[in-house]
Image (spheres, rainbow, N blue to C red):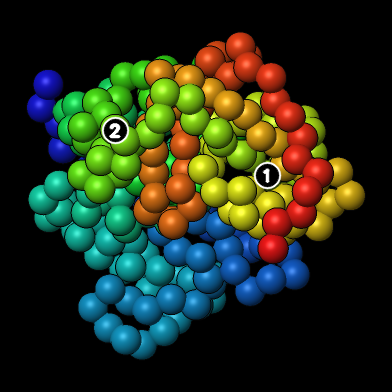
């Protein structure tokens, strides 16, 4: 299947007209393409407030639309969208993507914001569909191929309720960092020994030695809480 770039562009253009909303107490706003009320026009360095200068904001929207129309590939469109919105955009357009674009944009969306707000069963279906030769880069594929038959993985969480997530790591220090950053009395780190065939893929784009373990596979294993601190 070839990517239907025309539909992807249409979907991306629709996002331009999402109503921006101010985050109370902060000088930021929620919108797929902008994160602050004060932005620069696409063709100028002069900033303006999108809530105060309606005319310029409308001009920006049309300029952004033209920019998307002239994009040559899916990656260049995804790169315009704020990281926290990419997985939702992937959810909206993945059925129009080639195998290569599907896997690469799933990985890009995952790196940006994980699978928050995506149903577990759907997220698992996406990973199962993704071609691993595109999902991982060459370096990641090499490391993944060299993993032992049984792999020790770790997961740091803010609460035991989240221990069965997809994202694990080969590096215990990374897991403790995730647990510590939560600043929660319930935070903890879990250890699990999984068969390599259930370690779905390896990512290191964020230097976290991340291992994806699908939830349905994880249910077969015992998760042990780590009590020893890591420095």
Image x and y of residue 178, in percent: 66, 52
Identified at 58% across, 63% down, the residue is: 29
Sequence-first disc among 1 and 2: 2
- Please report the residue visible at 49 percent of the width from the left and 30 percent of the height from the top: 151
* SS at mark 2 in the image: helix
Residue 39 in the image, given as x and y percentages of width and height: 43, 76
| Residue 117 place in picture, x, y as percent | 59, 34
In three-dimensional space, the C-alpha distance between marks 1 and 2, rounded to whole angstroms, equals 25 Å
Can residue 209 be seen here? Answer: yes
Is residue 88 positioned above or below 222 on the image? below
Would residue 103 be seen by someone viewing this image from the given angle? no
**Looking at the figure, which quarter contains the N terminus?**
top left
Horizontal side, residue 174 vs residue 12: left or right: right
Considering depth in this image, is 60 or 113 the residue closer to the camera? Answer: 113
The structure residue drawn at horizontal position 39% and vertical position 50%, both measured from the top left corner, is 204
Q: Relative to 3, is 130 on the left or the right?
A: right
Tell me where residue 34 sits by quadrant. Answer: bottom left
- Answer with the quarter of the image where residue 144 lies: top left
Secondary structure category for the residue under label 1: strand
**Residue, x 61% and y 12% (percent of image)?**
220
- Rendered view: 131 above or below 81: above
- The quarter of the picture where residue 109 lies is top left
| Circle on res. 85 | none
In the rendered image, which residue does mark 1 sit on? 156
Q: Position of residue 70 (x, y in %)?
A: 12, 55
Please give left or right for residue 197 compared with residue 157 in the image.
Answer: left
Question: Badge 1 local density, few (<14 within 10 Å), some, or many (20+)?
Answer: many
Residue denoted by label 2: 145
> Vertical placement of 95 versus 143: above or below?
above
| Disc 2 residue crowd, few under 14, some 14–19, many 20+, Cα 10 Å | few
């Amino acid at each position: 299947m070839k990517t239907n770039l025309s539909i992807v562009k249409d979907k991306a253009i629709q996002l331009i007209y999402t109503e921006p909303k101010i985050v109370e107490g902060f000088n930021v706003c929620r919108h797929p393409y902008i994160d602050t009320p004060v932005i620069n026009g696409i063709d100028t360095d002069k900033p303006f407030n999108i809530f105060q200068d309606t005319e310029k904001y409308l001009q920006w929207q049309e300029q952004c639309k033209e920019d998307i129309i002239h994009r040559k590939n899916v990656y260049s469109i995804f790169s315009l969208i704020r990281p926290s919105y990419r997985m939702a955009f992937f959810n909206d357009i993945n059925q129009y993507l080639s195998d290569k674009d599907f896997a690469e944009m799933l990985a890009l969306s995952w790196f940006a914001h994980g699978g928050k707000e995506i149903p577990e069963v759907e997220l698992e279906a996406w990973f199962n569909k993704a071609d691993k030769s595109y999902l991982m880069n060459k370096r990641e594929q090499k490391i993944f191929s060299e993993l032992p038959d049984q792999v020790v993985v770790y997961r740091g969480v803010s609460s035991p309720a989240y221990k069965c997530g997809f994202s694990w790591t080969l590096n215990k220090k990374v897991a403790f960092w995730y647990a510590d950053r939560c600043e929660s009395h319930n935070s903890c780190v879990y250890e699990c020994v999984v068969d390599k065939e259930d370690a779905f893929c390896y990512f290191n784009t964020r230097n976290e030695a991340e291992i994806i373990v699908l939830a349905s596979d994880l249910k077969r294993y015992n998760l042990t809480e780590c009590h020893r601190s890591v420095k």
